[in-house]
Amino acid sequence: MQSDRNFQTDRIQRDRATPEIKRKVESWTVWEADAREPFEIHYDRAVSFCVKEGRAEIAFTDGTRLAVQKDDFVTIKPDIKGVWTVLEPITNLYVYHDTGSPA
């Protein structure tokens, strides 16, 4: 597991979830997926999620590849598409942002 999980582009940001962030996200919506065929997603709104368990890779249409794992906190800006590949069963807590800033 990488110790430095910081990653940022103009549309995607990944950091380690701090204890404060973990407390804030506990009330967010749960999403779970088992390892299976890759699936496409279109982020039409900004979203933030915190990985509680598991691992996955997201390959975005702009060429960015993002690995996510337990304790990663990710924010994705709207209007980007990608393909999720779940490598180990994954559980995320997520929220869509209609306005304002994440967590």
Image (cartoon, rainbow, N blue to C red):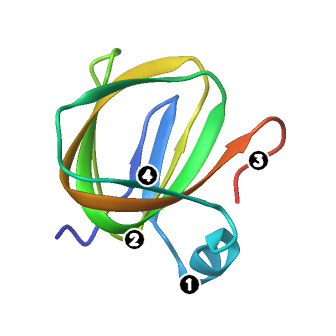
Residue 64 % position (x, y) = 30, 27
Question: Mark 2 or 3 closer to N-term?
Answer: 2
Q: Establish if 69 lies above or below 9.
A: below
- Determine contact: label 2, label 3, CB under 8 Å: no
Residue 15 % position (x, y) = 44, 60
Q: Amino acid at mark 2?
A: Asp
Work out how far the residue at label 3 is from the one at label 4, CA to CA, in angstroms: 15 Å
- Name the residue beneath numbered marker 4: 14
Question: Mark 1 or 4 closer to N-term?
Answer: 4
Q: Is residue 97 left or right of residue 21?
A: right
- Please tell me how crowded label 3 is: few (under 14), some (14-19), or many (20+) other residues with Cα within 10 Å: few
Q: Establish if 7 lies above or below 71.
A: above
- Name the residue beneath numbered marker 1: 19
Work out how far the residue at label 1 is from the one at label 4, CA to CA, in angstroms: 15 Å
x 76%, y 47%: residue: 101
- Name the residue beneath numbered marker 3: 101
- Name the residue beneath numbered marker 2: 71
x 66%, y 62%: residue: 28
Work out how far the residue at label 2 is from the one at label 1, CA to CA, in angstroms: 10 Å
x 70%, y 70%: residue: 27
Looking at the rendered structure, the number of numbered marks drawn on it comes to 4
Q: Amino acid at mark 3?
A: Ser
Question: Mark 3 or 4 closer to N-term?
Answer: 4
Q: Is residue 30 left or right of residue 103?
A: left
